[in-house]
Image (spheres, helix red, strand yellow):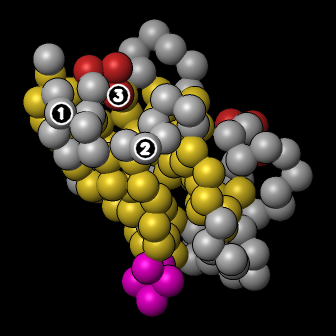
Amino acid sequence: EVQLVESGGGLVQAGGSLRLSCAASGFTFDDYDIVWFRQAPGKEREGVSYISWNDGSTDYADSVKGRFTISSDNAKNTVYLQMNNLKPEDTAVYYCAVDSTQNSGWDDVGGMDYWGEGTLVTVSS
C-alpha cells in the first residue's frame, strides 16, 4: 500500500522558515516524481515543486523560486521542502503527491496517483 505522510507544518512569522517532510512507503515504481502542492483557503490546489526520484531533477513554481528548496533522502524514502523567507501568501495546506507516469506536467493535479493528507502552514504578518 502506497503511503505518503507529511509533517513539519506550523505557525511561523513572515520571513521565517519551515522544513516540510514527506515520508513515502509502499512504492514499487522505478521512476517517479514526488510533487509538493498547496491549497490556500478558497483557492485551487497548485503545484509548488517537484523532484524526480530517479535523477534528482527539480522544478519550482515561480512564486517560490529562490525561497523554497526541494530535496530527497533516498535512504529514508523522504522528500523535504525547505521553505525560507515565508510570506503570508504561502499560508496553505501543503500536500505531497506521487506521479508515477509523468504523462502530464509536474504540476498537473489530475496527473497525480497518490496523495498525502497534508500539513498546514500558517504564516503570520
> What is the quadrant of the N terminus in the image?
bottom right
Q: According to the image, label 1 marks what residue?
A: 15
Number of the front mark, 2 or 3 = 2
Q: Is residue 50 above or below residue 37?
A: below
Instruction: Indicate whether 42 appears above or below 19.
Output: above
Q: Quadrant of residue 40?
A: top left
Judge by depth and name the residue closer to the eye, 124 or 29.
124
**Other-residue count near label 3 (Cα within 10 Å), few / some / many at <14 / 14–19 / ≥20:** many
Magenta highlight range: 73-77
Q: Which residue matches tag 2? A: 66
Density class for disc 1 (Cα within 10 Å; few <14, some 14-19, many ≥20) is some
Secondary structure at badge 1 equals: loop
Q: Which residue is mark 3?
A: 90
Q: Quadrant of the C terminus?
A: top left
Left or right position of 26 against 109: left
Residue drawn at point x = 27 percent, y = 26 percent? 87
Furthest toward the bottom, the residue is: 75
Task: Say what amino acid the circle numbered 1 marks.
Answer: Gly
Q: Amino acid at mark 3?
A: Asp
